[in-house]
Image (cartoon, grey):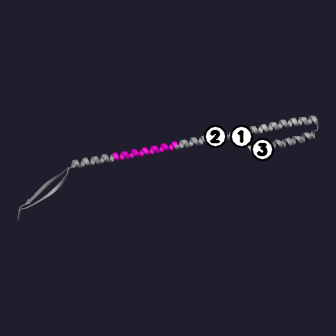
Amino acid sequence: MWKNHKNVACEKGKRTFCAGYTTIEINTWGLLGIAGVVVVVVVVVVVVVVVVIVVVVVVVVVVVVVVVVVVVVVVVIVVILVVAVVVIVVVVAVILVVVVVVVVVVVVVVVVIVVVVVVGKVVVVLVLGGVVAVVTAAAVVVVLVVV
């Protein structure tokens, strides 16, 4: 790769003077070879770094997407469960209120019929009707508070 050349300059004059010196000539093809290797190494390193960065970014994006999907699915399931529980509680409360009102109305009707048949007084019927109405309202309030 390196070439050494010996140049000898001899001058004739007062006396014979010979000076020797060495020059170094760089082999151009050798430099091109080194440059080629350096370029290949740099390109390979750059490609590897870019591939690693792309892989890391893709992995991060996939992980974020999976986490978001899982969170959304969990939230949807929780919302569905909460809505189902609320609907069930409301339906049960309505059923209880209806049952209590029907039972109270049946009892009132039976008591009114018995009182009218036995006593035959309108005043007693009105008093019993008012008592039953208060009891019914109280029963509905109790059921709503309990539920």
Q: CA distance from mark 1 to mark 3?
A: 15 Å
* Residue at (90, 35) in percent of width and height: 114
Q: What is the secondary structure assignment of the residue under circle 1? A: helix
Q: What is the secondary structure assignment of the residue under circle 2? A: helix
Residue underneath mark 3: 142
Tell which circle, 1 or 3, labels the residue nearer the N-terminal end. 1
Q: CA distance from mark 2 to mark 3?
A: 27 Å
Q: Is residue 82 left or right of residue 69?
A: right
Which amino acid type is shown beneath numbered disc 2?
Leu
Question: Badges 2 and 3: C-beta atoms under 8 Å apart?
Answer: no
Q: In the rendered structure, which segment of residues is drawn in magenta?
A: 44-66
Q: What is the secondary structure assignment of the residue under circle 3? A: helix
Residue underneath mark 2: 81
Indicate yes or no whether the magenta region holds residue 63: yes
Residue underneath mark 1: 90
Q: Is residue 65 left or right of residue 147?
A: left
Foreground pick, 137 / 17 = 137
Name the quadrant containing residue 76: top right
Q: Position of residue 37 (x, y in %)?
A: 28, 46
Q: Position of residue 10 (x, y in %)?
A: 8, 59
Q: Position of residue 48 (x, y in %)?
A: 37, 45
* Residue at (39, 46) in percent of width and height: 50
Tell which circle, 2 or 1, labels the residue nearer the N-terminal end. 2
The label number, if any, that marks residue 146 in the structure image: none
Query: Around disc 2, counting alpha carbons within 10 Å, would you say few (fewer than 14), some (14 to 19), or many (20 or more)?
Result: few
Tell which circle, 2 or 3, labels the residue nearer the N-terminal end. 2
Indicate yes or no whether the magenta region holds residue 46: yes
Which amino acid type is shown beneath numbered disc 1?
Val
* Residue at (10, 57) in percent of width and height: 8
Q: Is residue 26 left or right of residue 114?
A: left
Foreground pick, 100 / 83 = 100
